[in-house]
Amino acid sequence: MDSRVESTGLRAKPVAYIFSEDLVKISSRLPSNRNRSFLVYSLVQAYGLLTKCTGQAPQRFLVVRPRPAGKKELLAYHTHDYLEYAMNQSSDAQHLLGASEFGLEDDCPMFHGINDYITQVAGATLTGAAVIRNDVSDVSICWDGGRHHAKKAQASGYCYVADCVLAILFLKRTVPSAQPLKKPRVMYLDLDLHFSDAVSQAFFRPGSTTAAQVLTLSIHHTAPGFFPISPLASLPDVNDPTFDPFTLSVPLTAGASAKTFLRIWPIIEHVKDIFRPDFIIVQCGLDGLAGDPMATFNWSLGGEGSLGWCIHRIVHEWQGKKMLLGGGGYNTPNAARAWTYLTSVAGGIPLSLDADIPEYSAYLQFKPSFTLDIPAGNMQDQNTEEYLQTIEATYEGITSVLHSRMVSSTL
Ligand SMILES: [Zn+2]
């Protein structure tokens, strides 16, 4: 993409932070997360993470201004009919009758500026993908992206645009300048409380017998009636005829804490080591953190097995280029806390979770703690030893199939 890049430092490849005032303004209108984008950006700014460097220390961030996605880019996945409907803000009765067909009702109502929202968010995530693909950065961050429930022809679960799918399709394209020509492998890792149904389904190849360029892995909660309903949200079964070792799920039961994430993390790393991705997209949804109104998991921001710990490992220890996206997260001050902290972790300058939040115009929103930390609550972790052993045993079989596919692959 033709992105305007604003260099703010000395270091060869700082982390690309995708930002423009237009993006934050339109993203803050998202009905499910009003003003969240504003608060996230304002806190990142309050800590001075993106400001120009004046000393000898290397600059950690590069602010990259996205441009809106064009129709052709959106059509790489979405249908013409969906885009026509969603982006035509007519309020006449005939038009409104079609709302249910495209999912534009209930939790995904039409809203003023939806057309700009779709083009800006898709453009932002594609810009984040372009800067890592074009070697401008090895890591990019786009907290306004990560809309993992939006389907080809339907809005769903607060998501109107399939930016994750568009980014994966973009990154899997062969790089024309690369010698020898190589098909890049893209891993999509989803840490949101909810299953990444639309992304996983988009790349699901039921009963396939060959290696795929795209591997999706979602860690989430699932239970009868818990959104989204999908057979792919369950623990995969290698004996199922539709089994695809490149479409993976790790479902966790209620109360999942850092202890449980620490326990299952070797599985995630093992899958990554077998697949050896060139690009890793991480959907960093925050609705599994303690204090979120979803009140289902009990994940924390700092310490071993926490969200911050996982992101540190991915960004600083995994091979390949990474893009961090946003997602769910309905406690707005906590979303600002978490994504500000993850920004600092990605930049290699982790903020202190215990220190006071800087006093600035939105400071009072961070009461009563006035710190960055999101500690675990009192909820009991219902992921029993027996269940965790079942996950581990299941993944022994899955990774064995995955390995044999990769060994026989010519990718
Ligand atoms: Zn979610």
Image (cartoon, rainbow, N blue to C red):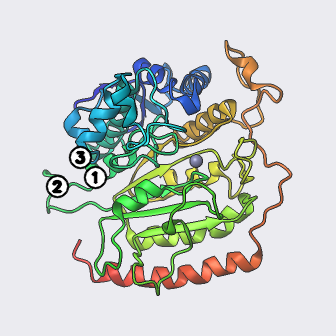
Amino acid type for the residue under numbered disc 1: Leu
Residue corresponding to mark 3: 76
Q: Is residue 316 left or right of residue 299?
A: left
Who's the residue at 14% across and 59% down the image? Answer: 179
Distance between the Cα atoms at labels 2 and 3? 23 Å
Q: Which residue is mark 2?
A: 178
Dot 3 alpha-carbon crowd within 10 angstroms: few under 14, some 14 to 19, many 20 or more? some
The x and y percentages for residue 214 are 34, 63
- In three-dimensional space, the C-alpha distance between marks 1 and 3, rounded to whole angstroms, equals 8 Å
Q: Nearer the viewer, residue 266 or 286?
A: 286
Residue 364 relative to residue 68: left or right: right
Q: Is residue 186 visible?
A: no
Q: Quadrant of the N terminus?
A: top left
Residue drawn at 47 percent across, 45 percent down: 156
Quadrant containing the C terminus is: bottom left
Distance from disc 1 to disc 2, alpha carbons, whole Å, reads 18 Å
What residue does disc 1 label? 169
SS at circle 2: loop
Q: Is residue 370 above or below residue 262?
A: above
Is there any visible trace of residue 192 in the rendered image? yes
* Among numbered discs 1 and 3, the one appearing first in the sequence: 3
Q: Looking at this view, is 118 or 373 the one in front?
A: 118
Give the class, few, some or many, for how many residues have Cα within 10 Å of label 2's Cα (few <14, many ≥20).
Answer: few
| Mark 3 residue type | Ala
Q: How far across and how far down the image is residue 374, in percent? A: 74, 41
- Choose between 321 and 100: the one closer to the eye: 100
